[in-house]
Amino acid sequence: MSQVISLDSILTQPASAADMRADLSKGGCSSSACGSSDGPADMPAEVWEKIKDHPCYSEEAHHYFARMHVAVAPACNIQCNYCNRKYDCANESRPGVVSERLTPEQAARKVVAVANEVPQLSVLGIAGPGDSLFDWRKTFKTFELVEQHLPDIKFCISTNGLALPDHVDEIAKHNIDHVTITINMVDPEIGAQIYPWIYHDGRRHEGIEASRILHERQMLGLEMLTARGILVKINSVMIPGINDQHLKVVNAEVKKRGAFLHNVMPLISAAEHGTHFGLVGQRGPTPMELKALQDDLAGGANLMRHCRQCRADAVGLLGEDRGQEFTLDKLPEDISYDPEKRKLYRELVEAERADHRKATAEATEALAHVAEPAAAKPLLVAVTTKGGGRINQHFGHAREFQVFEVDATGVRFIGHRRADNYCVGGYGEDDKLDVIIAALEGVSTVLTAKIGDCPREALEKAGLTVSDVYAYEYIESSIGAYYTATVGTVDAGRVSA
Ligand code: CLF
Ligand code: SF4
């Protein structure tokens, strides 16, 4: 077992650079692995350079780097059936969440304040609360102000794509290397079930005509961006019975046009959100339905599986929510940027990542020698983590589980399970455990840093294996070691399909 070295020391202490280095040298960082599907060996160096610190574009980076969103662009030019205009753009935010609206000047001040306090911050995203490119003046003004203060932050935007072809030059001018387009269909007949209207060329369009225009503009915008080498991620909302099977066609079409990643997100729909889909009872997919579709998409455009459907005012690592620490009323009067802590954090992360990758490679090599029974199915293993790629979170503090698939070919990250997606009833402790057990459908094992006797017994009674012997180890090598030690002995009743 390795000792914990932790980037935690940087993140939790107002330590001097010298203190941080001393802490690192005490280290003892050892093995385990990173489950990143694509690393520096899988792509041209210039592409890796663009994504290596982007928590959404690199699965590996999401263990170490944070993003923040600023809500500067309130206007929108379309209507999605999963959106309620009272809240923020549901194409890039959890539905039903409203953020603090900011002017570009307020946003720039907030970004500097967050950069001083959160050394993991690597990306500033503008994703609404309406459409970042329909409200383009405020979006580009914000980037212009931020780039004067923070030369070492990446810019990212998310858009529905309708106005995109008009702004590709401006996107390139501001060095926005990452653009997300939400594309839910390439067939306007399906689109008509998702979009009741759009506003384009000075007038409102409805029905199939609206979806046809949206589709053509989305494809044109995608082609224009990829022609300039800008990395494009496609978000698609999976809506069972409407576009779930169709997303295979979407995946093929966006791959053909050079999309870098495809992120299939589950529809989150509830009557209290006041959306059309919520009110008519349109359900979202179950975790296993989402996984089945993602498995079907293997071999197409590369999939992003670690999206957390962020809050609209998200600040922090994906899945973490520090937005409330940085509301306007809490920002200091005088803010000037101090790059030192961020610089040091990046140096330490580089070393940690190299160690993590080495451990992953060793774990994969060890798995290749496992005497796996011929009929063995991959196992799904859930872990609790608060970042850094380690099993370093107490079960009782976990608001989500990261889920990995393991077999003799390796350990693969396949997604996360948020217990709160299932929170529809009262919340006694027992209710919470029931919710968690339901969220872990298909999972056979939970690896955690620590767990009390009561939840351990409840999970075991539900057929799950629970272990804390890999506490503070890297995730992937722990799962590899667990698999090597137990293959062939896991209860087939909880083995995933
Ligand atoms: Fe924000 Fe989106 Fe940029 Fe990331 S989020 S604008 S690409 S910096 Fe990321 Fe959040 Fe998923 Fe979006 S986890 S909802 S994919
Ligand atoms: Fe809502 Fe975003 Fe759709 Fe506009 S693009 S209607 S803000 S979900």
Image: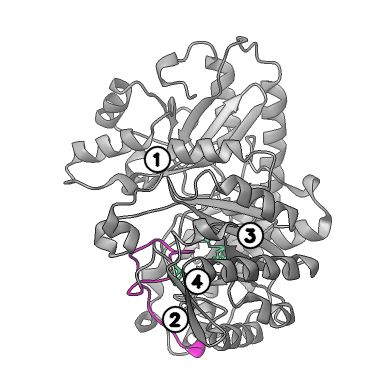
Residue 69, disc: 4
Ligand 2 within 8 Å, label 2 CB:
no
Ligand 1 within 8 Å, label 4 CB:
yes
Residue type at tag 2 = Pro
CB-based contact (under 8 Å), mark 3 and mark 1: no
Q: Which residues are magenta?
A: 85-105
Establish if 293 lies above or below 456.
below
Residue type at tag 4 = His
Q: CA distance from mark 2 to mark 3?
A: 22 Å
Establish if 56 lies above or below 472.
below
Which of labels 4 and 3 is toward the front?
3
Ligand 1 within 8 Å, label 3 CB:
yes
Residue marked by disc 2: 74
Q: CA distance from mark 4 to mark 3?
A: 17 Å
Query: Which label's residue is closer to the chain start, 3 or 1?
Result: 3
Residue type at tag 3 = Lys
Q: CA distance from mark 1 to mark 4?
A: 27 Å
Residue under the image location 38 percent in, 74 percent down:
99
Q: Main secondary structure of the magenta part?
A: loop
On the image, the x and y values in percent for residue 85 come to 36, 74
CB-based contact (under 8 Å), mark 1 and mark 4: no
Residue under the image location 49 percent in, 46 percent down:
244
Indicate the secondary structure of the residue bearing disc 4.
strand
- The color scheme shown is one colour
Q: CA distance from mark 3 to mark 1?
A: 23 Å
On the image, the x and y values in percent for residue 280 come to 28, 56
